[in-house]
Image (cartoon, grey):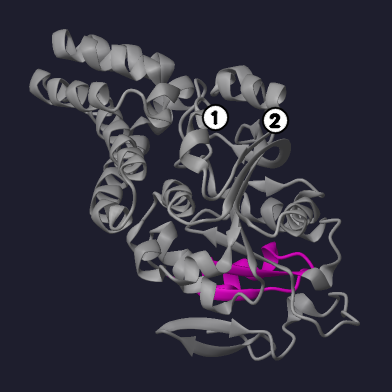
Amino acid sequence: MPSQAGPTPQVLSGKVVFSLTRTPEFMENAPKSSHSTSPRVSVIVTAHDRQSYLHSALVSLDQQSLPREEFEVVLVSNIEEAYLRPLLPNLPLRMVLEKRLGLGQKIATALPLCRAPIICFLEDDDAYAPEKLSTVLDEFRNDPQLGFYHNHYNLADGDGRQLPASIFRARTDRILRAAGQVRLGGHDRWAFLPRLEGIYPEFSNSCISIRRDMLEEHLDWLAQADLATDQFLLLLALRNPWNITIDARRLTTVRLHGANTSRISRESRNQASGGTRDLSERNYHALSGLAGRLKEGQPPEYSRIVDSVIAVETALLDLRRRADRGQYTRDLRSLMELRTTYPIKTREPLIGLTLLGVVLPSAAQKLYRSLAGQIS
């Protein structure tokens, strides 16, 4: 229970919400806005168990160049408020207690508290560059038809040391540095989908900003997405008539470490292999469960994208566990049938690894572990 000086608890959809109608102790020195207008950007911060990095994530929000009155923060986690209080900077926020593990469930719980038309996401072990929110707001202002925005990122290890781009999806880094930005129009997107090849526009919730109304229409789908929320958000954007922008500017720092669920780097793969296998299983089941609803009423081009995302997840799951030749044969058939779609062309080595699995399963798994940071 919060202390007497803390926020007054309310109940929202069965969850405890710490309302800021009374100013808690950790808000006493927060700057007071002279404006009564609603915020333009809402940031949903998600945390589960891990507290070691959360302070850095929140400090990065406290240091944003966007004026404080133009954005709001909703923190949703399974960590009690009394434990979080020492980690919090002087940043106005609302706190939601959500004990379920899935990121999709956490975001679905937080979304009703958000007032802004633009939603950004920040996971507890990542951080924003100071210009992140101002850049996001400019992009949505400059393009009223923008529905999904993804910014590039820097990589850091568990201690915050910057990692070279070459250890993780180096091809993506080269493409974005050359292109600057990749844009897909709303109604002609199918002709431009090949532009996404090699880019991984679904990577990391902390790099994604999206229209709130797109999420509000599909809250039940979002909750079902479990940990595959970044993939779900892109698939949701592709089935809507809004524009999509992939930006080369590095506005997020993404940590690669043994305790997270990010695709593993060379430094962390041995420590994280079990957790990554669990993530892969959950992603496969979540996306498979959503596939029918996502594809309903959509053109064949979209259905092939959904099928290819699931085919990739299936093949990756088999490379991360002890699959047999029959499983690799089925995976290879699916990958070959959908090989012209951008999710599979982005991971072309996956076809070769799966083919190797048909012949030598153990060799395929061993080779995958050495390449995981480049093709996962």
Residue 51 image offset from top left, x and y in percent: 57, 55
- Name the foreground residue: 44 vs 116: 116
Residue drawn at x 40%, y 62% as measured from the top left? 222
- Name the foreground residue: 119 vs 265: 119
Left or right position of 9 against 102: right
Q: Is residue 201 visible?
A: yes
Left or right position of 174 against 279: right
Residue drawn at x 31%, y 35% as measured from the top left? 308
Q: From the viewer's perspective, is residue 95 above or below residue 168?
A: below
Q: Amino acid at mark 1?
A: Arg
Q: CA distance from mark 1 to mark 2?
A: 32 Å
Residue 358 image offset from top left, x and y in percent: 15, 13
Q: Is residue 202 visible?
A: no
Neighbours of disc 2 within 10 Å: few (<14), some (14-19), many (20+): few
- Name the foreground residue: 123 vs 153: 153
Residue drawn at x 58%, y 19% as measured from the top left? 170
Say what secondary structure mark 1 lies in: helix
Residue 184 image offset from top left, x and y in percent: 58, 41
258 falls in the magenta region: no
- Name the foreground residue: 175 vs 363: 175
Q: Residue furthest left?
A: 326
Which span of residues is magenta-colored? 71-98
Q: From the viewer's perspective, is residue 90 above or below residue 187?
A: below
Which quadrant holds residue 306?
top left
Residue 77 image offset from top left, x and y in percent: 51, 66
Q: Amino acid at mark 2?
A: Arg
- The residue at which mark 2 appears reads as 161
Residue drawn at x 17%, y 21% as measured from the top left? 328
- The residue at which mark 1 appears reads as 195
Q: Are marks 1 and 2 in contact (CB under 8 Å)?
A: no
